[in-house]
Image (cartoon, rainbow, N blue to C red):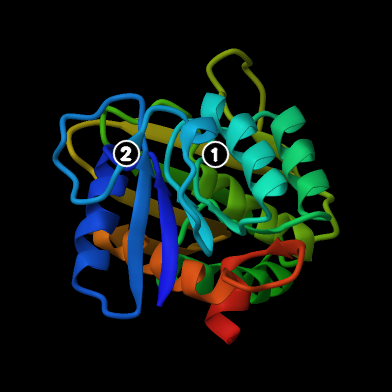
Amino acid sequence: MTRVIMHGCNGKMGQTISGLIAADEEIEIVAGVDAYDDGRNSYPVFHTIEECDVAADAVIDFSAAPAVDSLIAYCVEKQIPCVLCTTGLSEEQIAKVEEASGKVAILKSANMSLGINMLLKLLKDAASILAPAGFDIEIVEKHHNQKVDAPSGTALALADSINEELEHSYDYVYDRSQTRQKRTPKEIGISAVRGGTIVGDHDVIFAGADEVITFSHRAYSKAVFGKGAIQAAKFLAGKPAGMYNMGDVVEN
């Protein structure tokens, strides 16, 4: 039985994961952390991670960027592996996470779904063929109107996967409204849409002369992310210090 702390337990993803784990005999939530608590959970909830004194095998984090620094320090101190799912981290925070991975196991992923992580691999093959042939690359992501960060962490992960294959030779362009000029060949355009209750839509467009190839992923429920996070926690429990990703879980 894998024992986990749910960091951000009363958020939408925290509650989704709580429901999924309640029906899973291989894992249990032994404590939650959230600034707001109305007693809805069957497990104890602490207002801050520093207050949590419950032993666990892993932490699943779906919180907010400002809370990540304290979480990482806690995981290093307590030697508890962390499944880090919060997006919108600053470069300084990412550097701290990478440093901490030398002391404790951390699995960091912008998107926990199996489909997205398969797409990350497919895009490398597509980019290696289509980019040299002159295809332009654009990414359009759509999320609900409550999402704070833009572009999404997943959109950036898709761009990074492509750019890694292309030896980091491409620049990212987020806003074309401030300049009046033609598109350059070595850029990846990234656009964000916010509206309604869209769970998560991502389109990667390879536009060439007289043909367009589009890779699309649609998430219809937050459960797809929750299931991935749960599998990641089971995988990460007991692992030595290091930086892991969902590719490790998929291949395991």
Quadrant of the rendering where the N terminus is positioned: bottom left
Quadrant of the rendering where the C terminus is positioned: bottom right
Residue 190 marker:
1
- Residue nearest the viewer, comparing 157 with 7: 7
Residue sitting at the far bottom: 252
Mark 1 crowd level (few <14, some 14–19, many ≥20, 10 Å Cα): many
Query: In the visual, does 197 lie left or right of 157?
Result: left
113 w.r.t. 146: above or below: below
Residue drawn at point x = 26 percent, y = 36 percent: 144
- Residue nearest the viewer, comparing 224 with 242: 242
Residue 45 marker:
2
Say which label, 1 or 2, has the lower sequence index: 2
Query: In the visual, does 216 lie left or right of 107?
Result: left
* Element type at mark 2: strand
- Front tag of 1 and 2: 2
45 w.r.t. 129: above or below: above
Residue drawn at point x = 63 percent, y = 15 percent: 179
2 w.r.t. 138: above or below: below
- Residue nearest the viewer, comparing 226 with 23: 23
Q: Position of residue 20 (x, y in %)?
A: 23, 65
* Image quadrant where residue 125 sits: bottom right
* Image quadrant where residue 81 sits: bottom right
